[in-house]
Image (cartoon, helix red, strand yellow):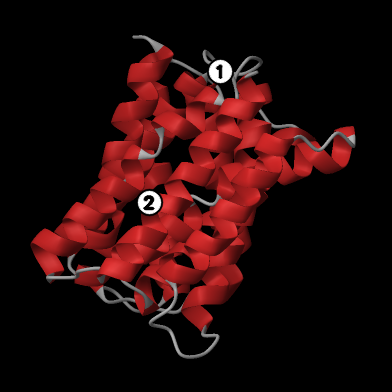
Amino acid sequence: MRGEIAILLSAVLMGTLPYFIKSLNLSPFSATFFRFFVGLVFLSIFMVVKKEKPVFSKQLFFLGVFSTGTIFFYITAITYLTAATAALLLYMAPVYVTIFAMLKEGNVSRMSILSLILGIFGLYLLLSPEKEISLGLVSGFISGVFYAGAFIMLNKLGKIYSPMRITFSNLLVGVVLLLPFFRFEFGDLALTLGLGLIPTAIPFTLLSYGMGRVKMEKGPVIALAEPVTAGVVGFAVFNETLSTIQLVGAILVLSAVFLALYEEGE
């Protein structure tokens, strides 16, 4: 399978996450724990079938920390915001990657500056209905920062380890980190199993596979299918809509992402 196709399928499946989160109605900690734990069970089965053994390293551990942070804060944002707004906050990640590259290399181009201006202004419009800083907004912002770190590491580790080993390590680290905070609350069994399989075990493996086979700047562009899918799910299932101003803001945010990634690819 081509890396681009794997990332696209991964993004579409991850975009179904708001359906499971809002339907289960669990606390963010419990929802994140169940996502990782059930996903880990499925991954263990996949690895037994494929006869792959787990591997562990310091880099895989830190990737797991980034992934756990991304998912926890994203789920928290989904809990308090519309699915589309939460997803777009998450997908400010490529802009943060560009900022990181600018600070690291010390070379600020006009395109980079333009992408940052568009991104910040678009974010302002997107969040204009929010009258004050909220837990959902802060969580959405943090999820994007963690996601940027995960993309950077995943591109490197995807060339070293197999997709299943990366995903297994990711999910195991998440379970270990979240276990002390887990509260014994349970939702619908079918939805919980679906949460661990459809937007977790399968797309995580596909993303690990794809990111190891494409340029780092190309992966996040393809993965923009996720906020689009999340927006469709929010509209179709939960009747969530964005105002005209928010739609303009969303377009500017996505434009900033494309510009940032175009600059990286130059």
**Quadrant assignment, res 176:** bottom right
For image coordinates 62% across by 54% down, the residue present is: 117
Label 2: which secondary element: helix
User: Which residue does the numbered mark 2 point to in the structure image?
Assistant: 251
Residue closer to the observer: 152 or 50: 152
Cα separation between marks 1 and 2? 29 Å
Residue closer to the observer: 37 or 260: 260
Q: Residue 37's spot in the image, x, y percent?
A: 43, 53
* Left or right side of 122 for 160: right
Q: In which quarter of the image is the N terminus?
A: top left
In the figure, 2 relative to 26: above or below? above
User: Can see residue 21?
Assistant: yes
Q: What residue type is labelled 2?
A: Ile
Q: Which amino acid does label 1 sit on?
A: Gly
Query: Which dot marks residue 79?
Result: none
Query: Which dot marks residue 212?
Result: 1
In the figure, 181 relative to 194: above or below? below
